[in-house]
Amino acid sequence: MNFNFSNPYASTRLPVFARNVVSTSHPLAAQAGLRMLYNGGNAVDAAVAAAAAMTICEPVSNGLGSDSFCILWDGKALHGLNASGRAPAAWTPEYFRRKYGQDIATPPKRGFDAVTVPGAVSSWVAMSERFGKLPFADLMQPAIEIAERGYLLPVVVQQKWAAATPELQSLPGFAQAFMPWGRAPNVGELFQFKAAARGLRAIAESHGQAFYGGEIAQAIEHFSAEHGGSLKASDFAAYQPEWVKPIARDYRGYTLHEIPPNGQGIAALIALGILDKFDVAAMPVDGVDSQHLQIEAMKLAFADVYRYVAEPSAMAVSVDQMLDDAYLASRAKLIDMKKAQDFGAGNPVKGGTIYLTAADENGMMVSFIQSNYMGFGSGCVEPNFGISLQNRGHGFSVDAKASNPANLVAPGKRPFHTIIPAFLTKDGQPVMSYGVMGANMQPQGHMQTLVRMLDYGQNPQAACDAPRWRYNAGLEINVESALDALTVQGLADRGHRMEVINDSYQDFGAGQFIWRAGDPKVEGYVAASDARRDGQAVGF
Protein backbone atom coordinates (compact mmCIF):
# COMPACT_ATOMS: atom_id res chain seq x y z
CA MET A 1 0.00 0.00 0.00
CA ASN A 2 1.46 3.35 -1.02
CA PHE A 3 0.14 5.75 1.59
CA ASN A 4 -0.04 9.50 1.25
CA PHE A 5 1.97 10.65 4.26
CA SER A 6 0.70 14.20 4.15
CA ASN A 7 -2.00 14.74 6.76
CA PRO A 8 -4.91 17.06 5.86
CA TYR A 9 -6.25 17.06 9.43
CA ALA A 10 -5.23 18.93 12.56
CA SER A 11 -3.09 16.57 14.60
CA THR A 12 -0.76 16.45 17.58
CA ARG A 13 0.72 13.12 16.44
CA LEU A 14 3.06 11.83 13.74
CA PRO A 15 3.40 8.25 12.49
CA VAL A 16 6.04 6.17 14.28
CA PHE A 17 8.36 4.00 12.18
CA ALA A 18 10.16 1.14 13.95
CA ARG A 19 10.86 -2.60 13.89
CA ASN A 20 9.41 -3.18 17.37
CA VAL A 21 6.32 -1.16 18.25
CA VAL A 22 3.72 -0.73 20.98
CA SER A 23 0.76 1.64 20.69
CA THR A 24 -1.61 2.28 23.60
CA SER A 25 -3.82 5.05 24.99
CA HIS A 26 -1.39 5.83 27.86
CA PRO A 27 2.37 6.45 27.44
CA LEU A 28 3.38 4.56 30.60
CA ALA A 29 1.61 1.43 29.36
CA ALA A 30 3.27 1.76 25.95
CA GLN A 31 6.63 2.01 27.71
CA ALA A 32 5.79 -1.05 29.83
CA GLY A 33 5.28 -3.05 26.64
CA LEU A 34 8.42 -1.65 25.04
CA ARG A 35 10.37 -2.63 28.16
CA MET A 36 9.44 -6.27 27.53
CA LEU A 37 10.66 -6.05 23.94
CA TYR A 38 13.97 -4.52 25.09
CA ASN A 39 14.31 -7.39 27.56
CA GLY A 40 14.08 -10.01 24.82
CA GLY A 41 10.34 -10.59 24.89
CA ASN A 42 8.01 -10.73 21.91
CA ALA A 43 4.86 -8.85 20.91
CA VAL A 44 2.67 -11.03 23.16
CA ASP A 45 4.86 -10.25 26.18
CA ALA A 46 4.63 -6.56 25.28
CA ALA A 47 0.85 -6.66 24.88
CA VAL A 48 0.28 -8.43 28.20
CA ALA A 49 2.57 -6.05 30.09
CA ALA A 50 0.87 -3.06 28.49
CA ALA A 51 -2.59 -4.47 29.26
CA ALA A 52 -1.71 -4.96 32.93
CA ALA A 53 -0.33 -1.42 33.12
CA MET A 54 -3.45 -0.02 31.49
CA THR A 55 -5.61 -1.33 34.36
CA ILE A 56 -3.72 1.15 36.56
CA CYS A 57 -3.09 4.01 34.12
CA GLU A 58 -6.61 4.25 32.68
CA PRO A 59 -9.05 2.97 35.32
CA VAL A 60 -11.79 5.08 33.76
CA SER A 61 -11.88 2.44 30.99
CA ASN A 62 -10.64 -0.86 32.39
CA GLY A 63 -9.37 -2.66 35.48
CA LEU A 64 -8.32 -5.99 36.95
CA GLY A 65 -11.99 -6.99 36.72
CA SER A 66 -12.24 -6.40 32.96
CA ASP A 67 -13.02 -8.63 30.00
CA SER A 68 -10.82 -8.84 26.91
CA PHE A 69 -10.44 -10.16 23.36
CA CYS A 70 -7.37 -10.69 21.19
CA ILE A 71 -6.45 -11.46 17.59
CA LEU A 72 -2.79 -12.29 17.08
CA TRP A 73 -0.48 -13.35 14.29
CA ASP A 74 2.13 -15.74 15.68
CA GLY A 75 4.37 -15.52 12.62
CA LYS A 76 2.59 -18.29 10.74
CA ALA A 77 -1.14 -18.20 11.54
CA LEU A 78 -3.92 -16.04 12.98
CA HIS A 79 -5.50 -16.84 16.35
CA GLY A 80 -8.48 -15.36 18.20
CA LEU A 81 -9.11 -15.32 21.95
CA ASN A 82 -12.48 -14.64 23.58
CA ALA A 83 -12.06 -13.77 27.26
CA SER A 84 -15.48 -12.29 27.85
CA GLY A 85 -17.16 -13.06 31.16
CA ARG A 86 -19.91 -15.56 31.85
CA ALA A 87 -22.98 -15.07 34.04
CA PRO A 88 -22.83 -16.36 37.63
CA ALA A 89 -24.57 -19.67 38.25
CA ALA A 90 -27.36 -17.88 40.14
CA TRP A 91 -28.41 -15.63 37.26
CA THR A 92 -31.76 -16.40 35.62
CA PRO A 93 -34.58 -14.11 34.50
CA GLU A 94 -36.42 -15.09 37.71
CA TYR A 95 -33.41 -14.02 39.83
CA PHE A 96 -33.66 -10.47 38.48
CA ARG A 97 -37.45 -10.29 38.56
CA ARG A 98 -37.51 -11.32 42.22
CA LYS A 99 -35.03 -8.59 43.12
CA TYR A 100 -36.10 -5.77 40.81
CA GLY A 101 -39.72 -6.44 39.82
CA GLN A 102 -41.52 -8.08 36.92
CA ASP A 103 -41.01 -5.16 34.54
CA ILE A 104 -37.20 -5.21 34.56
CA ALA A 105 -35.83 -5.44 30.98
CA THR A 106 -32.08 -5.82 31.61
CA PRO A 107 -29.83 -6.41 34.63
CA PRO A 108 -28.87 -3.19 36.43
CA LYS A 109 -26.34 -0.80 34.98
CA ARG A 110 -24.23 -0.59 38.15
CA GLY A 111 -23.59 -2.66 41.27
CA PHE A 112 -22.86 -6.37 41.74
CA ASP A 113 -25.83 -7.56 39.70
CA ALA A 114 -24.12 -6.08 36.65
CA VAL A 115 -20.90 -8.11 37.10
CA THR A 116 -20.13 -11.26 35.11
CA VAL A 117 -16.97 -13.29 35.81
CA PRO A 118 -14.09 -11.11 34.55
CA GLY A 119 -11.96 -12.66 31.81
CA ALA A 120 -9.04 -10.25 31.23
CA VAL A 121 -6.58 -11.87 33.65
CA SER A 122 -7.28 -15.26 32.08
CA SER A 123 -6.40 -13.84 28.66
CA TRP A 124 -3.05 -12.57 29.93
CA VAL A 125 -2.23 -16.03 31.27
CA ALA A 126 -3.46 -17.86 28.16
CA MET A 127 -1.52 -15.60 25.78
CA SER A 128 1.65 -15.81 27.86
CA GLU A 129 1.50 -19.60 28.22
CA ARG A 130 0.89 -20.26 24.54
CA PHE A 131 2.96 -17.58 22.81
CA GLY A 132 5.07 -15.60 25.31
CA LYS A 133 8.83 -15.81 25.85
CA LEU A 134 9.37 -14.08 29.20
CA PRO A 135 8.27 -15.38 32.63
CA PHE A 136 4.68 -14.31 33.36
CA ALA A 137 5.67 -12.58 36.62
CA ASP A 138 8.03 -10.30 34.67
CA LEU A 139 5.11 -9.06 32.58
CA MET A 140 3.27 -7.84 35.69
CA GLN A 141 6.25 -5.95 37.12
CA PRO A 142 5.79 -2.58 35.33
CA ALA A 143 2.11 -2.45 36.37
CA ILE A 144 3.03 -3.31 39.98
CA GLU A 145 5.60 -0.53 40.05
CA ILE A 146 3.18 2.02 38.59
CA ALA A 147 0.47 1.05 41.09
CA GLU A 148 2.88 1.18 44.04
CA ARG A 149 4.71 4.42 43.19
CA GLY A 150 1.80 6.11 41.47
CA TYR A 151 1.67 8.35 38.41
CA LEU A 152 0.58 11.91 37.65
CA LEU A 153 -2.94 12.01 36.25
CA PRO A 154 -3.13 12.98 32.55
CA VAL A 155 -5.66 15.33 31.01
CA VAL A 156 -8.20 13.09 29.24
CA VAL A 157 -8.28 10.40 31.94
CA GLN A 158 -8.86 13.09 34.60
CA GLN A 159 -11.80 14.55 32.68
CA LYS A 160 -13.53 11.17 32.54
CA TRP A 161 -12.66 10.39 36.17
CA ALA A 162 -14.25 13.60 37.40
CA ALA A 163 -17.32 13.12 35.20
CA ALA A 164 -17.96 9.59 36.52
CA THR A 165 -17.48 10.31 40.22
CA PRO A 166 -20.92 11.76 41.06
CA GLU A 167 -22.74 8.63 39.81
CA LEU A 168 -20.32 6.06 41.26
CA GLN A 169 -19.05 7.53 44.54
CA SER A 170 -21.56 5.65 46.72
CA LEU A 171 -20.94 2.22 45.18
CA PRO A 172 -19.02 -0.39 47.19
CA GLY A 173 -15.29 0.32 47.30
CA PHE A 174 -15.31 3.09 44.67
CA ALA A 175 -14.51 6.06 46.89
CA GLN A 176 -11.82 4.16 48.78
CA ALA A 177 -10.07 3.28 45.52
CA PHE A 178 -10.68 6.26 43.26
CA MET A 179 -11.39 9.26 45.52
CA PRO A 180 -8.19 9.42 47.58
CA TRP A 181 -8.92 12.95 48.86
CA GLY A 182 -12.68 12.59 48.90
CA ARG A 183 -12.81 13.66 45.24
CA ALA A 184 -11.44 12.71 41.86
CA PRO A 185 -7.73 13.51 41.46
CA ASN A 186 -6.82 16.64 39.51
CA VAL A 187 -4.57 16.81 36.47
CA GLY A 188 -0.97 16.38 37.59
CA GLU A 189 -1.81 14.92 41.01
CA LEU A 190 -0.17 11.67 42.08
CA PHE A 191 -2.50 8.67 42.08
CA GLN A 192 -1.38 5.50 43.84
CA PHE A 193 -3.32 2.23 43.83
CA LYS A 194 -1.57 0.04 46.40
CA ALA A 195 -4.49 -2.40 46.66
CA ALA A 196 -4.20 -3.14 42.93
CA ALA A 197 -0.45 -3.60 43.38
CA ARG A 198 -1.28 -6.37 45.88
CA GLY A 199 -3.70 -7.89 43.40
CA LEU A 200 -1.17 -7.77 40.58
CA ARG A 201 1.50 -9.28 42.79
CA ALA A 202 -0.81 -12.16 43.75
CA ILE A 203 -1.67 -12.70 40.07
CA ALA A 204 2.02 -12.65 39.13
CA GLU A 205 3.13 -15.05 41.86
CA SER A 206 0.33 -17.55 41.22
CA HIS A 207 0.29 -17.30 37.41
CA GLY A 208 -3.30 -16.11 37.66
CA GLN A 209 -4.52 -18.87 39.97
CA ALA A 210 -5.15 -16.44 42.83
CA PHE A 211 -7.73 -14.74 40.64
CA TYR A 212 -9.61 -17.82 39.48
CA GLY A 213 -9.08 -20.33 42.25
CA GLY A 214 -7.52 -18.63 45.24
CA GLU A 215 -7.47 -15.64 47.55
CA ILE A 216 -8.74 -13.05 45.07
CA ALA A 217 -11.72 -15.18 44.05
CA GLN A 218 -12.55 -15.75 47.72
CA ALA A 219 -12.26 -12.03 48.47
CA ILE A 220 -14.60 -11.15 45.61
CA GLU A 221 -17.15 -13.73 46.75
CA HIS A 222 -17.10 -12.26 50.26
CA PHE A 223 -17.34 -8.68 48.94
CA SER A 224 -20.19 -9.64 46.58
CA ALA A 225 -22.19 -11.35 49.35
CA GLU A 226 -21.65 -8.38 51.64
CA HIS A 227 -23.30 -6.12 49.07
CA GLY A 228 -26.14 -8.33 47.85
CA GLY A 229 -24.43 -9.93 44.85
CA SER A 230 -24.32 -13.57 43.78
CA LEU A 231 -20.76 -13.98 42.46
CA LYS A 232 -19.10 -17.07 43.91
CA ALA A 233 -15.52 -18.30 43.92
CA SER A 234 -16.92 -21.38 42.17
CA ASP A 235 -18.02 -19.14 39.26
CA PHE A 236 -14.40 -18.00 38.94
CA ALA A 237 -13.04 -21.53 39.21
CA ALA A 238 -15.32 -22.69 36.38
CA TYR A 239 -14.21 -19.91 34.01
CA GLN A 240 -11.96 -20.52 30.99
CA PRO A 241 -11.17 -18.22 28.05
CA GLU A 242 -11.85 -19.63 24.59
CA TRP A 243 -9.49 -19.78 21.62
CA VAL A 244 -11.59 -19.10 18.53
CA LYS A 245 -11.19 -18.83 14.76
CA PRO A 246 -11.66 -15.21 13.62
CA ILE A 247 -14.39 -14.48 11.10
CA ALA A 248 -13.45 -12.55 7.96
CA ARG A 249 -14.60 -10.60 4.92
CA ASP A 250 -12.62 -9.45 1.86
CA TYR A 251 -12.55 -5.76 0.97
CA ARG A 252 -10.54 -4.10 -1.82
CA GLY A 253 -8.10 -7.00 -2.07
CA TYR A 254 -7.52 -7.21 1.69
CA THR A 255 -9.22 -9.34 4.35
CA LEU A 256 -10.56 -7.92 7.60
CA HIS A 257 -10.70 -10.37 10.53
CA GLU A 258 -12.90 -9.98 13.61
CA ILE A 259 -13.74 -12.08 16.69
CA PRO A 260 -16.97 -14.08 16.07
CA PRO A 261 -20.12 -13.55 18.18
CA ASN A 262 -20.89 -12.98 21.07
CA GLY A 263 -19.16 -9.75 19.95
CA GLN A 264 -20.21 -7.07 17.49
CA GLY A 265 -17.18 -7.32 15.18
CA ILE A 266 -19.40 -8.84 12.50
CA ALA A 267 -21.00 -5.39 12.13
CA ALA A 268 -17.82 -4.04 10.53
CA LEU A 269 -17.71 -7.00 8.14
CA ILE A 270 -21.37 -6.54 7.14
CA ALA A 271 -20.89 -2.82 6.53
CA LEU A 272 -17.78 -3.39 4.41
CA GLY A 273 -19.60 -6.13 2.48
CA ILE A 274 -22.29 -3.58 1.64
CA LEU A 275 -19.77 -0.83 0.74
CA ASP A 276 -18.01 -3.31 -1.55
CA LYS A 277 -20.99 -2.94 -3.92
CA PHE A 278 -20.17 0.77 -4.46
CA ASP A 279 -17.27 2.73 -5.97
CA VAL A 280 -16.40 4.52 -2.76
CA ALA A 281 -13.05 5.82 -4.02
CA ALA A 282 -14.84 7.81 -6.76
CA MET A 283 -16.48 9.94 -4.08
CA PRO A 284 -14.53 12.75 -2.33
CA VAL A 285 -13.09 11.37 0.89
CA ASP A 286 -14.76 13.86 3.25
CA GLY A 287 -17.70 14.66 0.98
CA VAL A 288 -21.34 14.07 1.74
CA ASP A 289 -21.79 11.12 -0.66
CA SER A 290 -19.00 9.05 0.92
CA GLN A 291 -20.06 9.83 4.47
CA HIS A 292 -23.78 9.25 3.78
CA LEU A 293 -23.07 5.91 2.12
CA GLN A 294 -20.92 4.72 5.03
CA ILE A 295 -23.54 5.79 7.59
CA GLU A 296 -26.31 3.93 5.77
CA ALA A 297 -24.16 0.78 5.43
CA MET A 298 -23.43 0.90 9.14
CA LYS A 299 -27.13 1.28 9.96
CA LEU A 300 -27.95 -1.83 7.94
CA ALA A 301 -25.21 -3.74 9.74
CA PHE A 302 -26.41 -2.76 13.20
CA ALA A 303 -30.02 -3.60 12.34
CA ASP A 304 -29.00 -7.23 11.87
CA VAL A 305 -26.43 -7.32 14.67
CA TYR A 306 -28.85 -6.04 17.30
CA ARG A 307 -31.48 -8.53 16.15
CA TYR A 308 -29.38 -11.68 15.84
CA VAL A 309 -25.99 -11.54 17.61
CA ALA A 310 -25.60 -13.27 20.98
CA GLU A 311 -23.81 -16.29 22.41
CA PRO A 312 -23.27 -18.40 19.23
CA SER A 313 -25.16 -21.44 20.53
CA ALA A 314 -28.25 -19.27 21.06
CA MET A 315 -28.27 -17.45 17.69
CA ALA A 316 -31.13 -18.14 15.27
CA VAL A 317 -28.92 -17.46 12.23
CA SER A 318 -25.29 -18.27 11.46
CA VAL A 319 -22.36 -15.95 10.79
CA ASP A 320 -22.13 -17.34 7.25
CA GLN A 321 -25.77 -16.44 6.62
CA MET A 322 -25.24 -12.92 7.91
CA LEU A 323 -22.17 -12.45 5.67
CA ASP A 324 -23.59 -14.16 2.58
CA ASP A 325 -22.64 -12.08 -0.48
CA ALA A 326 -26.05 -12.30 -2.16
CA TYR A 327 -27.73 -11.27 1.10
CA LEU A 328 -25.41 -8.27 1.51
CA ALA A 329 -26.02 -7.27 -2.10
CA SER A 330 -29.77 -7.27 -1.40
CA ARG A 331 -29.19 -5.08 1.66
CA ALA A 332 -26.99 -2.69 -0.36
CA LYS A 333 -29.88 -2.12 -2.79
CA LEU A 334 -31.91 -0.61 0.07
CA ILE A 335 -29.60 2.41 0.29
CA ASP A 336 -30.98 5.65 -1.15
CA MET A 337 -28.06 8.02 -1.86
CA LYS A 338 -30.32 11.04 -1.41
CA LYS A 339 -32.17 10.05 1.75
CA ALA A 340 -31.33 8.84 5.26
CA GLN A 341 -33.37 5.81 6.34
CA ASP A 342 -34.24 3.91 9.51
CA PHE A 343 -33.64 0.29 8.53
CA GLY A 344 -35.07 -2.81 10.16
CA ALA A 345 -33.33 -6.17 10.40
CA GLY A 346 -33.25 -8.34 7.31
CA ASN A 347 -33.75 -12.10 7.02
CA PRO A 348 -30.31 -13.71 6.54
CA VAL A 349 -31.83 -17.18 6.61
CA LYS A 350 -32.92 -16.54 3.06
CA GLY A 351 -29.64 -16.00 1.67
CA GLY A 352 -15.44 2.91 28.80
CA THR A 353 -12.55 0.43 26.80
CA ILE A 354 -8.83 0.36 26.07
CA TYR A 355 -7.27 -0.94 22.90
CA LEU A 356 -3.58 -1.63 22.37
CA THR A 357 -1.44 -3.24 19.74
CA ALA A 358 2.14 -4.51 19.59
CA ALA A 359 4.43 -5.94 16.92
CA ASP A 360 7.98 -7.25 16.91
CA GLU A 361 10.77 -7.63 14.37
CA ASN A 362 10.15 -11.37 14.08
CA GLY A 363 6.70 -10.69 12.62
CA MET A 364 4.45 -11.35 15.61
CA MET A 365 1.54 -8.87 15.78
CA VAL A 366 -1.07 -8.54 18.55
CA SER A 367 -4.44 -6.78 18.44
CA PHE A 368 -5.82 -6.60 21.99
CA ILE A 369 -8.80 -4.94 23.65
CA GLN A 370 -9.83 -4.78 27.31
CA SER A 371 -12.77 -3.10 28.99
CA ASN A 372 -14.86 -2.49 32.07
CA TYR A 373 -17.70 -1.55 29.65
CA MET A 374 -19.29 1.70 30.87
CA GLY A 375 -16.33 3.72 32.12
CA PHE A 376 -15.35 2.35 35.52
CA GLY A 377 -17.85 -0.48 34.96
CA SER A 378 -20.04 -1.63 37.83
CA GLY A 379 -18.51 0.90 40.21
CA CYS A 380 -17.70 -1.94 42.63
CA VAL A 381 -14.04 -2.21 43.66
CA GLU A 382 -12.89 -5.08 45.90
CA PRO A 383 -10.78 -3.23 48.51
CA ASN A 384 -8.06 -5.74 49.43
CA PHE A 385 -6.80 -6.42 45.90
CA GLY A 386 -8.09 -3.39 43.97
CA ILE A 387 -10.32 -5.37 41.59
CA SER A 388 -12.42 -2.80 39.69
CA LEU A 389 -15.24 -4.93 38.28
CA GLN A 390 -16.90 -4.59 34.88
CA ASN A 391 -20.66 -4.27 34.28
CA ARG A 392 -21.04 -6.53 31.24
CA GLY A 393 -24.08 -8.24 32.75
CA HIS A 394 -26.07 -5.13 31.84
CA GLY A 395 -25.81 -6.36 28.24
CA PHE A 396 -28.14 -9.32 28.91
CA SER A 397 -31.90 -9.27 28.44
CA VAL A 398 -34.27 -10.41 31.20
CA ASP A 399 -37.31 -10.46 28.88
CA ALA A 400 -37.73 -13.39 26.47
CA LYS A 401 -39.83 -11.08 24.27
CA ALA A 402 -36.98 -8.60 23.79
CA SER A 403 -35.83 -7.58 20.30
CA ASN A 404 -33.04 -10.16 20.52
CA PRO A 405 -34.38 -13.12 22.55
CA ALA A 406 -31.11 -15.03 21.99
CA ASN A 407 -29.46 -12.67 24.48
CA LEU A 408 -31.67 -13.79 27.41
CA VAL A 409 -29.68 -14.17 30.63
CA ALA A 410 -28.80 -17.69 31.78
CA PRO A 411 -26.21 -19.29 34.10
CA GLY A 412 -22.77 -19.48 32.53
CA LYS A 413 -23.85 -17.59 29.41
CA ARG A 414 -21.91 -14.73 27.82
CA PRO A 415 -23.76 -11.49 27.00
CA PHE A 416 -23.67 -9.51 23.76
CA HIS A 417 -20.30 -7.77 23.76
CA THR A 418 -19.14 -4.49 22.26
CA ILE A 419 -15.32 -4.72 22.52
CA ILE A 420 -13.65 -5.96 19.34
CA PRO A 421 -10.03 -6.11 18.15
CA ALA A 422 -9.42 -6.13 14.40
CA PHE A 423 -6.74 -7.54 12.12
CA LEU A 424 -6.09 -7.04 8.41
CA THR A 425 -4.35 -9.49 6.08
CA LYS A 426 -3.59 -9.67 2.36
CA ASP A 427 -3.11 -12.96 0.53
CA GLY A 428 -2.93 -14.74 3.88
CA GLN A 429 -0.16 -12.53 5.25
CA PRO A 430 -0.41 -9.98 8.08
CA VAL A 431 -0.89 -6.32 7.21
CA MET A 432 -2.32 -4.40 10.19
CA SER A 433 -3.38 -4.91 13.79
CA TYR A 434 -5.77 -2.17 14.85
CA GLY A 435 -8.81 -1.19 16.83
CA VAL A 436 -11.01 1.77 17.73
CA MET A 437 -12.44 1.96 21.26
CA GLY A 438 -15.85 3.13 22.36
CA ALA A 439 -18.98 0.92 22.71
CA ASN A 440 -20.93 0.78 19.41
CA MET A 441 -18.36 3.18 17.91
CA GLN A 442 -15.95 0.27 17.55
CA PRO A 443 -17.20 -1.39 14.33
CA GLN A 444 -18.00 2.08 13.02
CA GLY A 445 -14.41 3.12 13.67
CA HIS A 446 -13.07 -0.08 12.13
CA MET A 447 -15.02 0.65 8.96
CA GLN A 448 -14.38 4.40 8.73
CA THR A 449 -10.62 4.21 9.25
CA LEU A 450 -10.21 1.19 6.95
CA VAL A 451 -12.13 2.90 4.15
CA ARG A 452 -9.84 5.90 4.51
CA MET A 453 -6.74 3.71 4.21
CA LEU A 454 -7.88 1.26 1.50
CA ASP A 455 -10.15 3.43 -0.64
CA TYR A 456 -8.37 6.76 -0.24
CA GLY A 457 -4.75 5.88 0.59
CA GLN A 458 -4.63 7.88 3.81
CA ASN A 459 -1.83 6.79 6.13
CA PRO A 460 -2.79 5.27 9.51
CA GLN A 461 -2.20 8.46 11.49
CA ALA A 462 -4.23 10.58 9.08
CA ALA A 463 -7.03 8.00 9.07
CA CYS A 464 -6.89 8.11 12.86
CA ASP A 465 -6.98 11.91 13.00
CA ALA A 466 -9.79 12.37 10.46
CA PRO A 467 -13.16 13.53 11.81
CA ARG A 468 -15.66 10.78 12.53
CA TRP A 469 -19.39 10.30 12.80
CA ARG A 470 -21.23 7.92 15.09
CA TYR A 471 -24.57 6.29 14.35
CA ASN A 472 -26.83 6.00 17.40
CA ALA A 473 -30.34 4.84 16.47
CA GLY A 474 -33.06 5.60 13.93
CA LEU A 475 -31.92 8.64 11.94
CA GLU A 476 -29.75 10.00 14.76
CA ILE A 477 -26.01 10.46 14.37
CA ASN A 478 -23.31 12.41 16.15
CA VAL A 479 -20.58 14.14 14.16
CA GLU A 480 -17.31 15.61 15.31
CA SER A 481 -17.07 19.37 15.11
CA ALA A 482 -14.08 19.09 12.76
CA LEU A 483 -16.19 17.48 10.01
CA ASP A 484 -16.49 19.79 6.98
CA ALA A 485 -19.41 22.20 7.41
CA LEU A 486 -20.70 21.59 3.86
CA THR A 487 -20.71 17.85 4.51
CA VAL A 488 -22.59 18.36 7.77
CA GLN A 489 -25.20 20.47 5.97
CA GLY A 490 -25.43 17.94 3.15
CA LEU A 491 -26.09 15.13 5.61
CA ALA A 492 -28.79 17.20 7.29
CA ASP A 493 -30.39 17.88 3.90
CA ARG A 494 -30.64 14.10 3.35
CA GLY A 495 -32.54 13.64 6.58
CA HIS A 496 -29.83 12.71 9.09
CA ARG A 497 -30.65 14.06 12.53
CA MET A 498 -27.34 15.29 13.85
CA GLU A 499 -25.72 16.57 16.96
CA VAL A 500 -22.29 18.14 16.53
CA ILE A 501 -20.10 17.04 19.44
CA ASN A 502 -16.83 18.46 20.80
CA ASP A 503 -16.16 15.62 23.28
CA SER A 504 -14.34 13.24 20.98
CA TYR A 505 -13.40 10.77 23.75
CA GLN A 506 -16.97 9.99 24.70
CA ASP A 507 -18.61 9.77 21.33
CA PHE A 508 -16.03 8.89 18.70
CA GLY A 509 -13.66 6.43 20.30
CA ALA A 510 -9.89 6.31 19.95
CA GLY A 511 -7.69 4.05 17.86
CA GLN A 512 -4.26 2.47 17.81
CA PHE A 513 -2.80 1.18 14.53
CA ILE A 514 0.26 -0.84 13.48
CA TRP A 515 0.71 -1.36 9.72
CA ARG A 516 3.40 -3.75 8.50
CA ALA A 517 5.59 -1.80 6.05
CA GLY A 518 7.46 -4.83 4.73
CA ASP A 519 9.89 -7.33 6.21
CA PRO A 520 9.73 -6.59 9.96
CA LYS A 521 13.50 -7.07 10.28
CA VAL A 522 14.15 -4.54 7.50
CA GLU A 523 11.34 -2.02 6.92
CA GLY A 524 9.43 -2.70 10.15
CA TYR A 525 6.08 -1.04 10.88
CA VAL A 526 4.16 2.23 10.70
CA ALA A 527 2.31 2.96 13.96
CA ALA A 528 -0.30 5.52 14.93
CA SER A 529 -1.97 6.55 18.18
CA ASP A 530 -5.20 8.51 18.49
CA ALA A 531 -4.95 12.07 19.82
CA ARG A 532 -8.44 11.70 21.30
CA ARG A 533 -6.76 10.06 24.31
CA ASP A 534 -3.53 10.49 26.25
CA GLY A 535 -1.77 7.72 24.32
CA GLN A 536 1.44 7.14 22.45
CA ALA A 537 3.03 4.87 19.87
CA VAL A 538 6.61 3.95 20.76
CA GLY A 539 9.24 1.76 19.19
CA PHE A 540 12.85 0.96 18.46
Image (tube, helix red, strand yellow):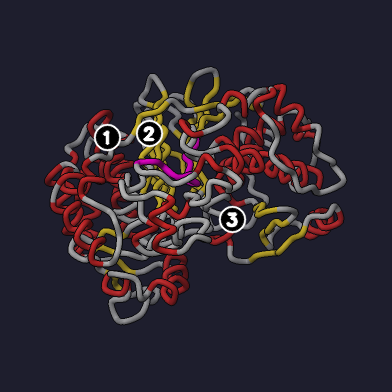
Q: Nearer the viewer, residue 492 or 235?
A: 235
Residue 375 image offset from top left, x and y in percent: 44, 61
Residue on which disc 1 sits: 126
Is residue 37 left or right of 417 when viewed as pictured?
Answer: left
How many numbered tags mark residues here? 3
The amino acid type found where label 3 is placed reads: Phe
Q: Nearer the viewer, residue 437 or 107?
A: 107
The image quarter containing residue 157 is: bottom left
The amino acid type found where label 2 is placed reads: Leu
- Look at 13% across and 53% down and name the residue there: 215
The image quarter containing residue 381 is: bottom left
Residue on which disc 3 sits: 508
Residue 220 lies in magenta, yes or no? no
Depicted 52 relative to depicted 131: above or below: below
Please report contact status of discs 2 and 1: CB closer than 8 Å, yes or no: yes
Residue on which disc 2 sits: 81
Dot 1 or dot 3: first in sequence order is 1
Depicted 526 relative to depicted 355: above or below: above
Residue range (magenta):
412-422
Is residue 357 left or right of 486 when viewed as pictured?
Answer: left
The image quarter containing residue 227 is: bottom left
Tag of residue 420: none
Dot 2 or dot 1: first in sequence order is 2
Disc 2 from disc 3: Cα separation: 25 Å
The amino acid type found where label 1 is placed reads: Ala
- Look at 54% across and 38% down and name the residue there: 309
Q: Quadrant of the N terminus?
A: top right
- Look at 32% across and 45% down and name the residue there: 120
Residue 413 lies in magenta, yes or no? yes
Disc 1 from disc 3: Cα separation: 31 Å
Disc 2 from disc 1: Cα separation: 9 Å
Q: Dot 3: few (<14), some (14–19), or many (≥20) neighbours within 10 Å?
A: many
